[in-house]
Image (cartoon, rainbow, N blue to C red):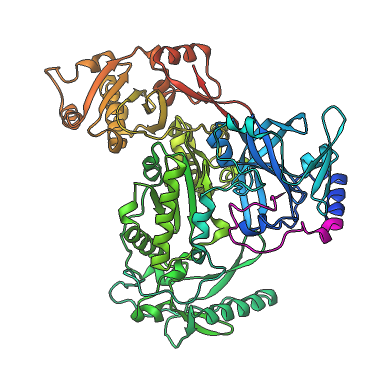
Amino acid sequence: MIQAPTAQAGMAYGNQQRPPYAPQAYQFQQAQRAAQAQNNNKKRNRQGQAFIMGTEDASIPGEVVSGTILVSSYPASVLFDSGATHSFIASSFISQREIESQPLPKSLKVLTGNGVVEVSRVCRRCPIKLGGGAFRTRLLVFPTSNYDIILGMDWLTATLANIDCGQGKISFQLPDGESYEFARDQNEFNAEELEKFELPVLLQGVAEQSFPRVVEEFKDVFPEELPGLPPDRAVKFSIDLIPGAAPIAKKIYPMNKEELVELNKQIKELLSKGFIQPSASPWGAPVLFVKKKDSTLRLVIDYRALNEVTIKNKYPLPRIDQLFDQLGEARVFSKIDLRSGYHQVKVKKEDIPKTAFRTRYGHYEFLVMPFGLTNAPAIFMDLMNRIFYQYLDKFVIVFIDDILVYSKSEEEHERHLRIVLQTLREEQLYAKLSKCEFWLDQIPFLGHIVSGEGISVDPKKVEAVKSWPTPKSVAEIRSFLGLAGYYRRFVENFSRIAEPLTRLTRKEEKFNWTEKCQAAFDELKERLITAPILALPSGSGGYEIYSDASGKGLGCVLMQHGRVIAYASRQLKTHERNYPTHDLELAAVVFALKLWRHYLYGERIKIYTDHKSLKYVFTQKEINMRQRRWLELLKDFDMELTYHPGKANKVADALSRRPEAFFMNTPKEILEDLRKMGIEVIRPLTEGMWQNLQV
């Protein structure tokens, strides 16, 4: 765990806790720095308490050593921070000045006073001019807002730095071995040098930026606790039962002493907040505890019996891949996570008794929507869609209690973020600040990493895949395929690779783990770990499909302006194995058009196939009934079928035929074919790092 910079205000606006920068804390700082230096080789990712300052505290003179320096030839505000284990650069600073950053092989966790923030990019060997010396410094990209650069313990230790907070200065060693002293509010260049930059730079320490103020204006949206019962809303939680359903009361589950203490505590908390009340209901669900990642206990109410007799709400939950399609050319992102979102919706008065649960300490029922009920996600999705209806697919994506705000520019993002926060305020919906992230050029959302470059698999979501044990049962295979299938958009030839595993899930198939099963299992794990970045659709036009079919399956690739948007493949159905080659190739085209209709309808499309006779599909005189049905579907699209010989259609051919990882082991001749077609390939380098290669 990395300790966050203590002046990081991008995640903790308005927090008034005092940092350890006052003169009387100087001895503590020196002891802390000495201990960190001593253990530097043993514990590089040392955990520790991080002190977070708000905007007001960061500007108090006499408490910090800061000033202005040159970073990549740009003026930048800097804070020397012995409370940060690493050095950081503001994500907004590098995006405004097009400073290059690279993805980390593995994302790092940064501990802040309000929780943990994921860091996934780094500026390696970033040039810094300070004291007449030139340093090459490793800077983690982080959503700091009060300072452009924070030089932490890694830099301070390497330069043998000594901070004197009382005198407001820092001394350190230059690359040539000479000692240099930097005074508070010192600038490393004169006014004439500043003029050529034409940038709004604040010379006295803290650089002002507009986006923190947006969040500071809405501090009431981020309370430490929910203020009480939610107001009456347009949507209330209801529980409609199947005809003839009778009340169900289950036996209480036994608990150990530790769990009973925690149960008593959590019941008191729920009562004090007004979320539950004593009940005399004939209904009664048992309760149990599950351990969270931090080893604390989460209270879970086992509503399975109630769910079985509940009429299912058919309100549609959006498809994850279609949500991402709306992002287009967005470059700036913020994520807002509601605080205990379900508890911000009331239960209909007549349905309150059905939520009753039984415990060692009494019988209670919920006045707010509890977790674990079958229709809870649909009800909450309905509420959020009503609230943000006019902004959906314009600059807001909502999935249950997660909100993503996306914009093409920082100026636009400030306006969008203010609209969203104002909407939350008006609706009296509250967010959890420690789980929110603001003003980032890439952001984790729904198991993916979203950026201006496209979408990729969230490394921490597939971390478990690396150590996933070999399945020992059909249930374990289904569990693994469930995770892998969630990311199938990123895996070329997915269905072809998974075929030995999916075969074992059939009822008539005997469980027999073979070498082919192990090879498929290992291949899918590797593909998930090294999945590429896929582009997002941008505007209209430029769509191309590369399709192919074989005796094993159908494969296709959707591209726009030379970049891959998605892969798709499926195994042949039993009756399709008897199709002639011509029909199989046409089936691959139909499969692609049906799957990606939401992209392609109304667009001009080029479809490349390696089956020459398909060029004449619209003019051939004799067609069978199957072809007639397909031709009716094809007429809905403005499409041009183009013949590409098999050698030039390697992209789709790889999907339908070969199990090898195309982007991991790409033969030179295929790269040459792609180059001739003007296709941009996103190819893995080392340890999960990716780079765009124009081949």
Left or right for 392, reference 604: right
- On the question of residue 517 being in view, the answer is no
Q: Which residues are magenta?
A: 1-28
Please, is residue 421 above or below residue 242 in the view?
above
Quarter occupied by residue 362: bottom right
Q: Give residue 633's position: percent from left, percent from top.
A: 19, 32
Q: Nearer the viewer, residue 1 or 623?
A: 1
* Residue plotted at (44% across, 66% down): 429
* Residue plotted at (39% across, 50% down): 396
Quarter occupied by residue 160: top right
Magenta-highlighted stretch: main secondary structure?
A: loop
* Residue plotted at (87% across, 49% down): 34
Q: Nearer the viewer, residue 574 or 238?
A: 238
Q: Nearer the viewer, residue 516 or 342?
A: 342
Quarter occupied by residue 140: top right
Left or right for 139, reference 323: right
Q: How many marks?
A: 0
- On the question of residue 575 being in view, the answer is yes
Please, is residue 586 above or below residue 171 in the view?
above
